[in-house]
Image (cartoon, rainbow, N blue to C red):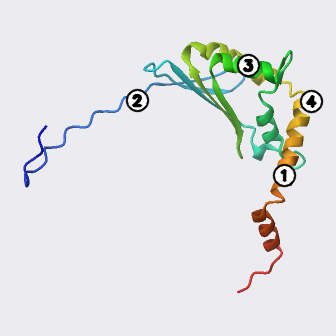
Amino acid sequence: ASPRPRGEPPPPVGRAKPPKVPRLERFTLANGLPVLIVEDRRLPLFELRLSMPAGKLSEGSSEPGQSEAAASLFFKGLPGRDAAAIASALTGLGVSIGVEGRRECALLSASGLTRNAEPFLRLLAELLTRNAFPEPEVRLWRDQTLDRLRQVRLDPDFLTGEAMKNTPAEV
């Protein structure tokens, strides 16, 4: 297309095409978990988000950090399968996955090729219902968390903030 001559008005704007909104399917599993599915078959990929009411707000005062520990240890063990076996299964399926302990919920996200969705969902169901939290993995997580906390206490920004808490504000 050649450029418009100077001073000529632009062509009229055409009608906007209505967006193609995928159909949303809703149902509830027998255990009460609500499920929302949006299917889009343009690419052979799946993407999953699972929100569970297991965040920091659900922790008791005697259980601080429990939701973070559960999120960090989620893929670390099943009866008869250790963290390496679970990681190997996920890698073999080509699934990218993450678990995050948030304030109000635990959020699991995953994505991969559609052809691997079914075996992944079987593994996920097993993790959700039979997770073992093996003692060596729990101990390792605890030790690493304590090391991180000790490291934070050496950080100049942290130390400055702590010192400022005890300094009266001048007006």
Left of 113 or right of it: where is 6? Answer: left
Please report whichever mark, 1 or 4, sits nearer to the chain's N-terminal start.
Answer: 4
Callout 1 amino acid: Leu
Callout 4 amino acid: Glu
Callout 2 amino acid: Val
The residue depicted at 83 percent of the width and 60 percent of the height is 154
Q: How far apart are marks 1 and 2 (CA)?
A: 46 Å
User: Which of the image's four quarters has the C terminus?
Assistant: bottom right
In this rendering, which labeled residue sits more in front, label 1 or label 2?
1
Residue underneath mark 2: 21
Q: Do the residues labelled 1 and 4 touch (CB within 8 Å)?
A: no
Tell me the element at label 2: loop
Q: In this view, does 64 lie above or below 77?
A: below
User: Which of the image's four quarters has the N terminus?
Assistant: top left
Tell me the element at label 3: helix
Please report whichever mark, 3 or 4, sits nearer to the chain's N-terminal start.
Answer: 3
Q: Do the residues labelled 2 and 4 touch (CB within 8 Å)?
A: no
Q: Distance between the residues labelled 3 and 1?
A: 30 Å
Q: How far apart are marks 1 and 4 (CA)?
A: 21 Å
Q: Distance between the residues labelled 3 and 2?
A: 36 Å
Residue 11 image point, x, y percent: 13, 44
Would you identify the image quadrant in which residue 141 lies? top right
